[in-house]
Amino acid sequence: MYSQPAIADVIERHFIPVRLHVKEDAEQFKRVGGLLNAQWTPTTLIIDPPATERHRIEGFLPAQDFASQLALGLAKSAFARGQYDEAARAYDEVLARYPETDAAPEAQYWAGVSRYKGTGDASALAETARRFKERFADTSWAKKASIWG
């Protein structure tokens, strides 16, 4: 299903892929796509049981960007389950493995929030705001974190 071995490996290890082709599976795509609000193809959804959407990727992305979005989705899923330590590690992994992608500033923001939620220590937020001054300073995520610094 995925031509890039690195992408196929991530999907195999962490997800249960379901593919509906807009033309080959037209009726099923229409039904399921309507339920999931899939307005464009490809739409990749990271869903936790019982069908709670955690992350959405719409449109084609180069392999590195797609991989970063999958990793971001895994982190968001851990965060939503209240597994803040796991989420912080997963967000840190996005930062380490995909520092030049659009997912990186979002991961930096949520890594700080995960640490705060896990410990209740507001210094995690202040540290995140400081990091935004060093990296990703011109992003919307830095603006969101600016009140912490």
Image (cartoon, rainbow, N blue to C red):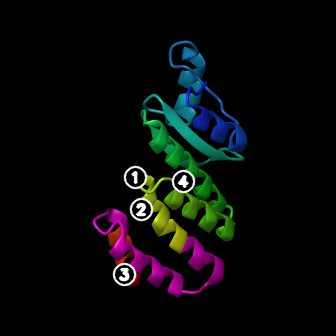
Residue located beneath label 3 in the image: 147
Residue 13 position, x and y percent, is: 71, 42
In space, the residues marked 1 and 2 are separated at their CA atoms by 7 Å
Q: Quadrant of the N terminus?
A: top right
Which mark is nearer the camera, 1 or 3? 1
Q: Amino acid at mark 2?
A: Pro
Main SS of the magenta part reads helix
Which residue appears at 45% of the width and 54% of the height? Answer: 103
Is there a contact, CB below 8 Å, between mark 4 and mark 1? no
- Identify which residue, 71 or 144, lies in the foreground: 71
Type of amino acid under label 3: Ile
Q: Name the residue tied to disc 4.
A: 72
- For disc 1, the marked residue is 102
Going from N to C along the chain, the mark reached first, 3 or 4, is 4
Q: Is residue 91 shown above or below 23?
A: below
Distance between the alpha carbons at the discs numbered 3 and 2 = 16 Å
The structure residue drawn at horizontal position 63% and vertical position 33%, both measured from the top left corner, is 8
Discs 3/2, front: 2
Label 1: which secondary element: loop
Q: How many other residues sit within 10 Å of disc 3, few (<14), some (14-19) or many (≥20)?
A: few
Residue 28 lies, in percent from the top left, at 60, 20
Q: Residues within 10 Å of mark 2 (few under 14, many from 20)?
A: many
Taking the image as drawn, is residue 63 in sight?
yes
Q: Residues within 10 Å of mark 1 (few under 14, many from 20)?
A: few
Compute the Cα span from label 4 to label 1. Answer: 10 Å
Which label belongs to residue 105? 2
**First-in-chain label (1 vs 3):** 1
Disc 4/disc 2 C-alpha distance (Å): 11 Å
Q: For the view shown, which residue lies furthest in the top direction?
A: 24
Q: How many marks?
A: 4
Q: Nearer the viewer, mark 3 or mark 4?
A: 4
Residue range of the region highlighted in magenta in the rendering: 113-141
